[in-house]
Every structure is written in structure tokens, then in C-alpha cells.
Amino acid sequence: MTIAVDCRMITSSGVGVYLRGILPFLFKSGNEIIQVNCNVKPFSITELFFFPSSVLKQINKADIYYSPFFNVPCGIKIPVLTTIHDIIFPDMPQLFSKPGLAIRMWFLRRAIKKSSKIFTVSQFSKSRIEHHLGLKKPVIVTYSAIQSIFLDYKSSLKNIQKKEIIVFIGNIKKHKGLDYLLDAYKLAKEEGLTHKLLIIGSKDNFRSADNKIFKKIEEIGSDSVLFTGFVSDEILLETLASASLLVQPSLYEGFCLPPLEAMTLGTKTLISDIPVLKEIYDSYPVSFFESGNSIDLKNKLLEILVKRRENQLSLPDTLTLKYTFEKTASIILNNL
């Protein structure tokens, strides 16, 4: 079988991780894999109406077209499979303008209409897709997974010295929860917490409707709340491994990898009790706090970092390898 795989988003942070994870196993499957690469941006007018004929000719020679996201170029005449990572648009419409929401939902419905099968990354996302769109087509769960670089780094770890650092990975979009993490952190500092809060990501690339986040950081102090800027994989691995705690205060996710990455490297995690995180991390040694509750988050920060002062976490291989891209690719291949 010949599978055309849309690889245009392979360098992105979310969809790209998933695509980079499954691609080696698609190649190993014995199928012929056509990597679709061109300069046409996903979700663009060109993709919808003027996709290059030379690329379409190559795609339509294949048996299956697979898109790792919910964008499907025009002119594809073979069966289409797509992965929808989450369905935040109708679940949290307050995050989008009315035109923005309408456009996103149009692309989503278009992808679903054109897809013979749909994959998603959690049972939670599957339930939300079926709830909003009432699908008759199959929705198949193909969990995301830990990247091999984390497993390789884990095997080389010895006795790493933990630092008084709390790590947050993400941006300042409202559903990521940084707003109330800052509230909780400020309260915890007032009660004796000495750890610094490290936000992994570029301050310049973070988007917000107002300056509320940055005002809170100024009130806390830039010596306590730090932005890393862009970090290489090596620095990310070192930072996560040496941190005392990773906090994931999300209000909404499709899967959410940072807690798994942190635990793989021996770092404790404190995560919100939203349904998808309760699903994904049900059997893991995580600490949960009430989603959106800065007081409960503050109390858990103090309990873990001031009162307990536990040693480094050790995640067993059964949990480290619970989610693998080999398993994910296998499910996709079995549903071609």
C-alpha cells in the first residue's frame, strides 16, 4: 500500500511531535510512504483552492492520504484519514471571536466530511468530537506518546542535582492556566516558598488579549518568574530533569505531554484535575489540584515543595512505555 503523509507541519511543537513520532514506524511497516512537503500553508486559501497540481498528482497516485491535523487540501481523490487532536473551539468558544470560531468549525467539519476515518489522541477528545458533531464515522483513539529523546536521556541519567525551580511549559492562552498559576505562586511565596518559576517559551511569542499576565509577573518580580526564550532539546531535557516540580495548570487539553516528559526524567508533577488529565495520568504518580482554583494550587505547591521535600521521582518502565508512538502507528496502520 502507498500512503501519502502530509509532512508540512513536521517542525511544529504539537502536531509535529506526533508526526515525527509515528513517521519512523510508518516507514518500517513495509508500506510505501510519500512525504508531502510544499510551501503551501495549512488552512490557507492556496490549500483550499490552488494546491499545486504537481503535488496533487503525486498524492493521488497513493492509496491513502493521511493528514496529522484537520486540514485537507483541495483536489484529493483518494481516501483521506485525519487526526483531530482536540475540539477546543466549541468547548471553549469564549477564547475565540465569532468569525474565528466559525472559520475553525468550518475547517473541522470539512475535514470530517472528507475523512473516511478520524483519529484522535484521547477518549476525552473522542467523546467531545462525537458530542459536538454527532458522527456516524469511526473515531479511533491513537494516544500521543513520549519522544525518543526523553527515553534516551533517561537512560543516561544518574544522580542529578535538583534545583529550586518550578517549571511551566506552554503559553499564556487562557486555557493553559498560567494566569491562576501566577496567583497561586505569589500566595505560596508569601507563605515561604523559595522556588523560582521558570516559564519555558519565548516571552515575545506569547499572545494575550491584554497585559494582565505581565502585570502579575511584574508584581511578583522578574527575579522570581523567568522566561527561558527558545530552548534547544538538550537544555529542555536538562531543565526538566533538574527541576523540583512541573506544574500543568491547564483548563483544557487534548492529551498533554509535559507531565509524562517530566516524570520520565524523574521530576514530580502537579496537574489540574480536568477530565483528560485524569484519563491520561490515572495510574501515574502525579498530584492533582482543583482546576482553576489558585488557593488549592497554592496549598499543593507548599505541601509538595515545603512540607514534603521528597526525593526524585522514579517512574517504572511500565508507565514510561504506556504510551508509545509504535503503538500509535500500529493502530493507524491497522485502520487503513
Image: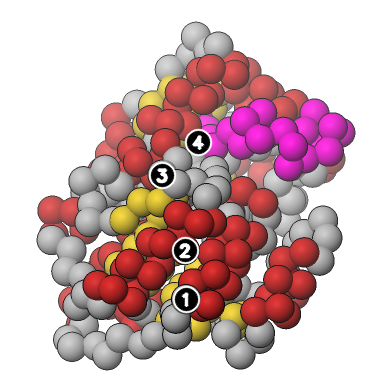
Q: Earlier in the sequence, mark 3 or mark 4?
A: 4
Report the quarter where the N terminus lies.
top left
Q: Kindly identify the amino acid type of the residue bearing the numbered disc 4.
A: Thr
> Which numbered disc, 1 or 4, marks the residue closer to the eye?
1
Return the residue nearer the eye: 169 or 318: 169
Q: Report which residue position mark 3 lands on.
A: 273
Label 3: how many Cα within 10 Å (few below 14, some 14–19, many 20+):
many
> Which numbered disc, 3 or 4, marks the residue closer to the eye?
3
Q: Earlier in the sequence, mark 3 or mark 2?
A: 3
CA gap between label 3 and label 2 equals 15 Å
CA gap between label 1 and label 3 equals 24 Å
User: Do the residues bearing badges 1 and 2 touch, measured as CB atoms within 8 Å?
Assistant: yes
In percent of the image, x 77 and y 64: which residue is there?
Answer: 212
Q: Is residue 125 above or below residue 143?
A: above
Q: Report which residue position mark 4 lands on.
A: 83
In percent of the image, x 40 and y 67: which residue is there?
Answer: 301
Q: Earlier in the sequence, mark 1 or mark 2?
A: 1
Say whether residue 43 is left or right of residue 329: right
Q: Secondary structure at mark 3?
A: loop
Q: Earlier in the sequence, mark 1 or mark 4?
A: 4
Q: Is residue 147 above or below residue 92?
A: below
| Residue 193: image location, x then y, percent | 44, 79
Label 1: how many Cα within 10 Å (few below 14, some 14–19, many 20+):
few
What is the magenta range?
A: 81-102
In percent of the image, x 86 and y 33: which residue is there?
Answer: 99
CA gap between label 3 and label 4 equals 25 Å
| Residue 237: image location, x then y, percent | 38, 78
Q: Secondary structure at mark 2?
A: helix
Residue 119 visible? The answer is no
- Taking the magenta stretch, the answer to whether it contains residue 100 is yes
- Residue 238: quadrant of the picture: bottom left
Q: Report which residue position mark 2 lands on.
A: 298
